Amino acid sequence: MKLYPLKFQPILKNIIWGGSEISKFKNLDKETPGIGESWEISAVEDNVSIIENGDFAGTPLDVLIKKAEAKLVGKKVFDKFGDKFPLLIKFIDARDDLSIQVHPDDKLAKERHNSFGKTEMWYVVKAAPKAFIFSGFKDKITPEEYVEKVANNTFTDALQKHFVKEGDVYFIPAGRVHAIGSGCFVAEIQQTSNITYRIYDYNRKDANGNSRELHTELAKDAIDYTVYDSYKTDYESKHNQTNELVSCEYFTTNLLEIDKAIEKDISNIDSFIIYMCLEGTCILKDNKQNKITLSKGETTLIPADTQNIVITPSGEAKLLETFVK
């Protein structure tokens, strides 16, 4: 089986808080408002990505994993996850404030939902003036005070509010209360999980006048109530180098800002590698002489049996690089 860099049909999610940036950012044929998320690579049940290029065009990701196994995802990844792809890759465009939520960790998610937990990270691609996110607590509260604050609509007073700009990075481990605010356009890397506990939704009503379901009690035991000194991820970005943003047990994500060709020896990673193009256009060529063009808003998966890759930008390009250690 000859594997090559894969592209996938984006899974576009029309959501009540969705904006108008995703279709423009991805240069889709039709500009469509209301798209809140583009699931770039997904193996979530009923939302499995379909390959759109090459000999495997039309094949679902999970089907190819069953056939290619470690050649596609890496031996250690396949040994741990089998044919379950471990990451969900998204772009998110928030026209309105998203609900405040938390995700359970692996242990709690397994007990309650037979699912993985959800640790994630955000890279801010674009941000409107005064755009913000919530991440973590600014004040120490108890589980009982949490329930009370949700009930009396003062929960946001206890949260740390962060005004954001392009290039900001926030790591959101399972258990950390968080929310994306209006005007944020982010790239999100997360564990494969669709388990979300909605804590607070600003008393909003849907089109039928109904409030969305809250998971106050479920979230109570999932929340990490610790107050941390800092919630933002600081990093240094050097041009034409690999700059680490986040590294955890679930994924490692790096930033590449390049204006010349760079060659990467990836033979010892033993994992698939995902590239999300945030700016510009580049050509990726592997040691098997496969070539693929990646433009702003596009995402590709490099199979684990790839030994070497050369990334050549047309002018300047910015990419996120993600794999499993």
Image (cartoon, helix red, strand yellow):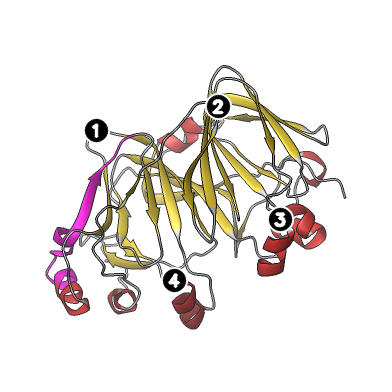
Camera-near label (1 vs 2) is: 2
Rounded to the nearest angstrom, the CA distance separating label 3 from label 4 is 23 Å
Rounded to the nearest angstrom, the CA distance separating label 4 from label 1 is 33 Å
Magenta stretch? 149-165
Which mark is first along the chain, 1 or 4?
Answer: 4
Give the vertical position of 126 relative to 312 (above or below): below
114 relative position to 261: left or right? left
Identify residue for label 4.
Answer: 105
The C terminus sits in image quarter: bottom right
Which mark is first along the chain, 3 or 2?
Answer: 3
Instruction: In the displayed orientation, state which residue is furthest to the top.
Output: 315
Rounded to the nearest angstrom, the CA distance separating label 1 from label 3 is 40 Å
Amino acid type at circle 2 is: Asn
Closer-to-camera residue (55/323): 323
Amino acid type at circle 3 is: Val
The reply to whether residue 105 is in sight is yes
In magenta segment, residue 138: no
192 relative position to 306: left or right? left
Amino acid type at circle 1 is: Pro
Identify residue for label 2.
Answer: 240
Element type at marker 4? loop
Which mark is first along the chain, 2 or 1?
Answer: 1
Element type at marker 1? loop
Residue at 55% over, 31% down: 241
Camera-near label (1 vs 3) is: 3
Identify residue for label 3.
Answer: 73
Element type at marker 3? helix
Residue at 51% over, 65% down: 193
321 relative position to 70: left or right? left
